[in-house]
Image (spheres, rainbow, N blue to C red):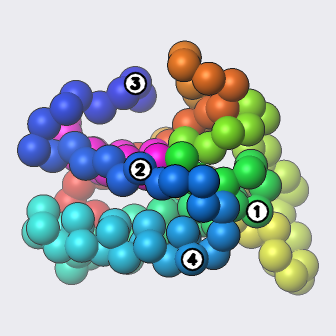
Amino acid sequence: MGPAPVTAHHRELVFGETADLEACSQGITWVRQTLTDWGLLDQGQDALLIAAELLSNAVRHAGGIRTLTLAHHDGLLQISVTDPSPDPPKLRAHRPDSIGGHGVFLIDRLAHHWGSRPNDHDHGKTVWATLPLPF
């Protein structure tokens, strides 16, 4: 899925140089408010979990969060996080008994589709996930 069209159903949160868990918390609060504004929060718990995993993965493994984008169109909600690392996320063999390492597995299980794409304007990437509407 390519970039979402800029409409009333497209919002972006731009982060500064923040690369910590406080940025994750800010992003999750913003996702919750945006879903509420769009009337989608009641069934949007999977969207919140996916957003939390994308945000925390960007902080822990990719040098921080540049942008967080939500868009809904054509019956899909797309959640995208841009970070400064060019390295795509990897879906590894899941070990349920391990501590940590479940983020991409959870995204893979909950999302309709997910992936990553390099940024045209820098060396980073955008990791995105889609969920069908209504949830």
The region drawn magenta spans 67-80
The correct choice, above or below, for 31 with respect to 99 in the image is: above
Q: Real-space Cα distance between discs 4 and 1?
A: 12 Å
Which quarter of the rendering shows the N terminus?
top left
Viewer-nearest of labels 2 and 3?
A: 2
Taking the magenta stretch, the answer to whether it contains residue 82 is no
Q: Real-space Cα distance between discs 1 and 3?
A: 25 Å
The residue indicated by pointer 2 is 14
Report x, y in % for residue 45. Answer: 37, 76
Q: Real-space Cα distance between discs 2 and 4?
A: 14 Å
Instruction: Tell me the residue at 62%/33% (across/down).
Output: 125
The residue indicated by pointer 1 is 60
Viewer-nearest of labels 4 and 1?
A: 4
The residue indicated by pointer 3 is 2
Q: Real-space Cα distance between discs 3 and 4?
A: 29 Å
Instruction: Tell me the residue at 73%/38% (across/down).
Output: 85
The correct choice, above or below, for 32 with respect to 93 in the image is: below
SS assignment at label 3: loop
The answer to whether residue 47 is seen in the rendering is: yes
Viewer-nearest of labels 3 and 4?
A: 4
Viewer-side residue, 24 vs 17: 17
The first of marks 2 and 3 along the sequence is 3
